[in-house]
Image (spheres, rainbow, N blue to C red):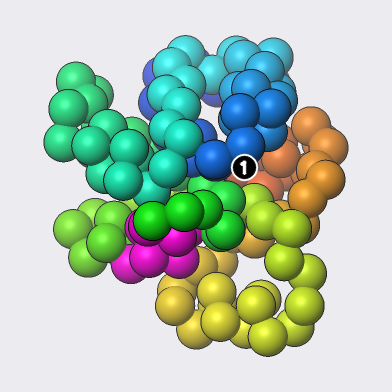
Amino acid sequence: MDGTSGGLNILVVDDDEGMRKLIGAMLKRMNVDLVTEASSGDEALECFSTAREPFNLVICDWEMPGVSGIDLFKQVHASGPKLPFLMVTGRSDLESVAAAKKAGIVGYLVKPISPQQLRAKIAVLLLADR
C-alpha cells in the first residue's frame, strides 16, 4: 500500500468487540474508505448478502461461536475464490497454521498484531490479488 488505501471495502469479523474496534481503528488510520464489522461468522455471511459494494478483503478471527473463521473462509472462497482473506487469530501452533494453509488461507497473523504487521500483510494480499 502506498500510504493511502482509498476505495477499499474491508469486512472485519471477530466475536471480541475490542479486537474488532482495534482492527477497525488501524484500518481507518490507513485511510481505508469503508470498514464493515461483524461479530460472528453468521453475521459476516449476512453482510455478504446485503453489502452495497463488494468487499476487497476479509479480516477474520478463527475462534467464534457458530460459524468459525475457517468455515467462513470455505463458504466465502466457494463463491469468491479470489477474495483476499486474512486470518487474525490467537492460534500460533503449527497444526493450526498448517490447517489454515491446507484450507487455502494464505494470510495469517497471530494476535496481538501491530499496525505495521497489518499494513504489510494487507499489502501482500492485495498485490497477490492483482
Taking 46 as reference, is 107 above or below it?
A: below
Q: Quadrant of residue 49?
A: top left
Q: Quadrant of the N terminus?
A: top right
Q: Is residue 2 left or right of residue 50?
A: right
Image position, residue 66 (x, y; %):
38, 56
Residue 46 can be seen in this image: yes
Q: Quadrant of residue 70?
A: bottom left
Q: Is residue 63 left or right of residue 95?
A: left
Q: Residue at x 27, y 61 (%)?
A: 75
Q: Residue at x 68, y 33 (%)?
A: 19
Image position, residue 17 (x, y; %):
61, 28
Residue of label 1:
123
Residue 128 can be seen in this image: no
Residue 121 painted magenta: no
Front-most of 10 and 39?
39
Image position, residue 73 (x, y; %):
39, 61
Front-most of 23 and 2?
23
Determine the main secondary structure of the stretch shown in magenta.
Answer: helix
Q: Which region is colored magenta? A: 67-74
How many tags in the picture? 1
Q: Secondary structure at mark 1?
A: helix
